Amino acid sequence: MTANQRLVVMLYALHPTDRSGAVLETAANLAKLVGMAAPFFSRTRKQVIEAGWLEETERLGHIRYYRLDPKRMGENVVALRRAT
């Protein structure tokens, strides 16, 4: 893993998340936080996704949200939904 890939993983690990563990922040805003150009951040994040460290949790319109893969973090995640 490159230094930039580690930076992206650490950003997702340390950034506030919702209940599912998703970081609800755009790539542009996350890129600003670590001083990367947005396109470079997106390419690096794609590499981290392909390496299995991040997974997509939801999509609102054209915006995708990601979280650290719980299996990589040594967690067993159970999602409960109320029956309708």
Image (tube, rainbow, N blue to C red):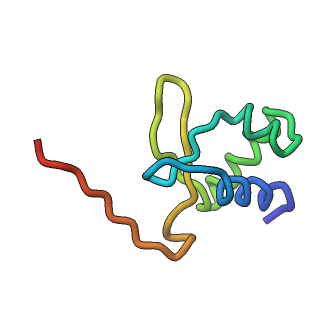
57 w.r.t. 79: above or below:
above
User: Residue 36: where, in percent of width, then height?
Assistant: 86, 40
| Residue found 72% across the figure and 54% down from its top | 11
* Tally of numbered discs: 0
> For this view, does 16 lie left or right of residue 8?
left
The residue furthest front is: 16
Residue 84 in the figure: left or right of residue 53: left
| Residue lying at the far left of the rendered structure | 84
Identity of the residue furthest to the top in this view: 61
Q: Residue at x 81, y 42 (%)?
A: 33
The location of residue 55, given as percent across then percent down, is: 53, 52
Is residue 10 or residue 4 the one in the foreground?
A: 10
Q: Quadrant of the N terminus?
A: bottom right
78 sits to left or right of 23? left
Question: The C terminus is located in which quarter?
Answer: top left
Query: In the displayed structure, would residue 5 be above or below residue 72?
Result: above
Q: In terms of image quadrants, where is residue 38?
A: top right
Q: Residue at x 69, y 36 (%)?
A: 27
Q: Residue at x 47, y 73 (%)?
A: 75
Q: What percent of the width, then of the height, locates residue 16?
A: 61, 50
Percent x, y of residue 66: 56, 46
